[in-house]
Image (cartoon, grey):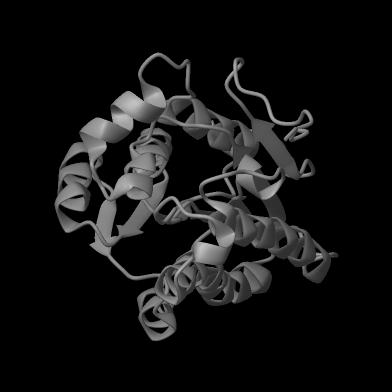
Amino acid sequence: MLGTELESALITGGSGGIGSEIVRLLTRDGIAVAAVSPETERLAALAEETGAECLELDIADHDAVNSFCADREFDILINCAAVLGTMTKLHETTPEQAEMLVRVNLLGTLNCLRAVTPGMLARNRGHIVNFGSTAGSYPITGEPFYAATKAGVEMLTKNMRLDLFGSDIRISEILPGRVASGMHAEMIGGNRKEAWARFYDGFDCLEPVDVAQIVHYILSAPAHVDITQIEIMPTRQVFGGSMFHQD
């Protein structure tokens, strides 16, 4: 169970594979959850299932985020929303794709932090969980600009911890490896069936609930304990090694 000082949560990307599992876990603990994403149909189904408040919101829209949070108090902010974009090399990334990745992964995260953190500071309580990625820690092919935005989230998280030094607000970051969430369909134009065959079938990937349980573990730590960063990987996934091209 979570501490009694944590009563309400804002979860971005709440209709996604990981986000929806976090919603399920927190509502079972009696947390008043507001889950937001652009996917109205999935949100409606999640609201019916969990009783959470599920609303359509573009986190990249600064004014919309401010308006949504204006009269609300959140003890927990989970920045789970992100986009991958299509597979490409860094020098072939289009301006449109680069802008989309920055707007959601970086500016969207920042918009939510700006909207929620002042209230946490005023009450001197709260827990912020940002989602980075192992892609932001290691070189990766296919999604290099996504990786760059996730590296940005890691530095944003570390600097936020400095900015809030002296308060009782905790800042945590989760760096998942490959999760069978369906998100990888973005990389190949949205074909979920093909994505499942290409990225998940035959691989022992993390499941969304695995990552959600890590979030729950982080939030359940005693108030004086800040679990600052966790990297969670499938047992059979690894980064590193050396490549040497021979003509």
Residue drawn at point x = 32 percent, y = 42 percent: 185
Q: Position of residue 13 (x, y in %)?
A: 38, 53
Q: Position of residue 191 (x, y in %)?
A: 23, 42
Residue drawn at point x = 68 percent, y = 56 percent: 151
Observer able to see residue 74: yes
- From the viewer's perspective, is residue 99 above or below residue 200? below
Furthest-front residue in this view: 247
Q: Nearer the viewer, residue 186 or 159?
A: 186
Q: How many marks?
A: 0
Where is residue 19, by image quadrant? top left
- From the viewer's perspective, is residue 148 above or below residue 70? above
Left or right of residue 39: residue 122: right
- From the viewer's perspective, is residue 71 above or below residue 132? below
Where is residue 214, by image quadrant? top right
Residue drawn at point x = 77 percent, y = 59 percent: 158
Q: Nearer the viewer, residue 232 or 83?
A: 83
Left or right of residue 206: residue 64: left
Q: Position of residue 188 (x, y in %)?
A: 33, 46
Q: Nearer the viewer, residue 33 or 149?
A: 149
Q: Position of residue 121 (x, y in %)?
A: 67, 71
Observer able to see residue 126: no
Residue drawn at point x = 34 percent, y = 54 percent: 35
Quadrant of the drawing holding the C terminus = top right
